[in-house]
Amino acid sequence: MNALSGYAAFSHRTKVTSILIYLWAVIFICDTVVNLAVSPITMKLLGGLVFGGYGPVAEFLSLDYYSLSHYEYWRLLTYGLGHTGILHLYFNIWAVHFIGKRVEKQAGGRLTFSVLFASYLINGCLFAGLYKPLISFSPSVGTFALFGMWLVYHVANKHRTNLSAQEKSAIIILLAVNLFGVDALFVHAVGFAVGAAAGLLHSAFMKGPSQKNRATPQ
């Protein structure tokens, strides 16, 4: 009971990242169920569920230039909700659980939400313009934005961001599985840059008042 209540209290303090994880899981389950309903159960389909593939729900949420040219602007954000396989989903959830929740606890829910929103929107606009023939499912843009924030906090305030073995594993897995292909490098770099910039601004804002308070004579 104590462990469960502690986890519930921690999740209550990290609502944004918790909701993001739940959304990812629910949408993946819905996409899988619909895909199984409209497609025969074959080895190709099952392989797609594990190693990469998507169904009608994820396709409806995906990002591409052609859809945007037909005024389907919701895709600039919803492409960050679909995954192309259960491994893709698992690694993103793992990283957000161990890195994102730590970031939200330090940055707060509003800033965390704003950074996620900005990273998906900025990357969506850039990707649609630069990679017109491609379709994007890039939930890890947000994951890398959170990683960028965490890295800034870690450098600026190391004693509060010491990592456990699980968190170190999350970072290694995040980097190992998400940096294949020029387009992948691009979208993850955009997410990381947005998160790092937000972390730098937030750290500078928090550091300024604290230094001013220390300099004020009592």
Image: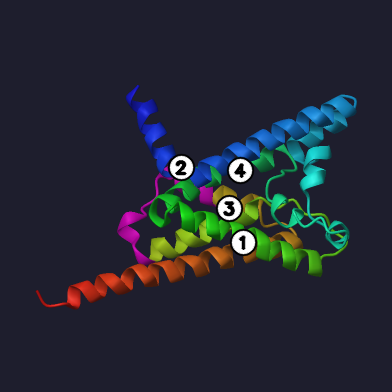
Residue 9 x/y as whole percent:
37, 35
- What number is the disc on residue 27? none
**Does any portion of residue 26 appear in the rendered image?**
yes
Label 3 to label 1: alpha-carbon separation: 10 Å
Magenta-span inclusion, residue 159: yes
Residue 64 x/y as whole percent:
83, 57
Q: What residue is shown with label 1?
A: 119
Q: How many marks?
A: 4
Number of residues whose C-alpha sits closer than 10 Å to that of mark 4, classed few (under 14), some (14–19) or many (20 or more):
some
Amino acid marked by disc 1:
Ser
Residue range corresponding to the magenta coloring: 156-171
Secondary-structure class at tag 4: helix
- What number is the disc on residue 91? 4
> For the point 75% across and 39% down, which residue is it?
51
Number of residues whose C-alpha sits closer than 10 Å to that of mark 2, classed few (under 14), some (14–19) or many (20 or more):
few
Amino acid marked by disc 3:
Thr
> For the point 90% across and 25% down, which residue is it?
40
Q: Between disc 2 and disc 1, whose residue precedes? A: 1
Q: What residue is shown with label 2?
A: 166
Dot in front, 4 or 2: 4
Label 4 to label 3: alpha-carbon separation: 10 Å
In the rendered image, the vertical position of residue 49 relative to residue 15, given as above or below: above
